[in-house]
């Protein structure tokens, strides 16, 4: 049994997964900080299912990219649980987890998260024999740079993520390649998806200790950039 957590965006999501079965999933999209919501959500999901945290084999957490504050809160929560129960942490890329929301398609899968300043957190994936394979590693880049990169592939693309809202018009205007936008229910990070992917990682022994766990921000925070600009 794995506890999966995501706090990389405004959405907070937790799930309990066993093998490829999502036993329970709890997500909120509220204007509350994750420090207010995550632990109560975790406590509630165990209370509702009657399951015991002591039966967990691992904790899975998206380790970036995403909201700097959200990632830190989620990371601290996952590390605390893993340390208390002496279980490993499974690190999942936020972008890879989003790509897993879509499968069984011959089109490229391109998650886009709004990274502000006309940039996105993104990556490119393809579905091959029921597996999602990475074509372009997760990164932060300008939206027009991403469009140019996708145009060169010549492959149709499905976009998903919260970056659709701010960048849909730019993509439609600049991109000549045939492309599609996923429906709203597929555009949020889901702990259930993260948990199913994490179970695969667990069987492959792709996990770390709570001490080894680390976050991937992909760029400096706004506060860090401002400090650098001030010299």
Image (cartoon, rainbow, N blue to C red):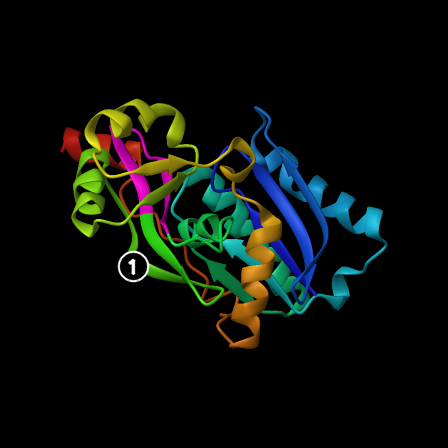
Q: Magenta span: helix, strand or loop, mainly?
A: strand
Residue 21 left/right relative to 230: right
Of residues 156 and 16, the one nearer the viewer is 156
- Relative to 26, say whether 130 is above or below: below
Q: Which residues are magenta?
A: 107-122
**Relative horizontal placement of residue 218, taking residue 73 as reference (left or right):** left
Q: Nearer the viewer, residue 112 or 33?
A: 112
Q: Quadrant of residue 219?
A: top left
Side of 210 relative to 176 (left or right): right
For the point 36% across and 50% down, the residue is 107
Tell me if residue 51 is in the magenta stretch: no
Occupied quadrant, residue 17: bottom right
Residue visible at 52% across and 69% down in the picture: 201
Residue located farthest toward the right when viewing the structure as drawn = 50
What percent of the width, then of the height, locates residue 6? 55, 46
> Number of callouts in the render?
1
Q: In x, y percent, where is residue 30?
A: 60, 26
Q: Residue at x 43, y 37 (%)?
A: 161
């Amino acid at each position: 049994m794995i506890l999966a957590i995501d706090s990389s965006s405004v959405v907070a999501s937790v799930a309990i997964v066993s093998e490829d079965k999502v036993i329970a999933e709890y997500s909120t999209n509220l204007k509350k900080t994750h420090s207010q919501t995550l632990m109560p959500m975790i406590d509630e999901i165990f209370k509702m299912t009657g399951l015991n945290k002591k039966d967990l084999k691992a904790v899975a957490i998206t380790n970036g990219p995403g909201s700097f504050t959200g990632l830190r809160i989620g990371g601290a929560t996952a590390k605390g649980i893993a340390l208390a129960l002496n279980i490993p942490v499974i690190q999942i890329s936020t972008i890879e987890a989003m790509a897993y929301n879509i499968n069984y398609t011959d089109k490229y899968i391109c998650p886009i998260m709004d990274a502000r300043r006309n940039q996105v957190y993104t990556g490119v994936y393809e579905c091959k024999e029921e597996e999602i394979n990475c074509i372009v590693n997760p990164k932060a880049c300008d939206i027009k740079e991403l469009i140019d990169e996708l145009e060169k592939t010549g492959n149709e693309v499905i976009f998903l993520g919260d970056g659709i809202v701010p960048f849909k018009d730019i993509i439609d205007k600049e991109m000549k390649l045939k492309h599609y936008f996923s429906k709203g229910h597929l555009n949020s990070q889901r702990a259930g998806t993260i948990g199913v992917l994490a179970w695969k990682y667990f069987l492959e022994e792709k996990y770390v200790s709570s001490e080894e766990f680390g976050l991937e921000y992909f760029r400096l925070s706004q506060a860090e950039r401002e400090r650098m600009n001030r010299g």
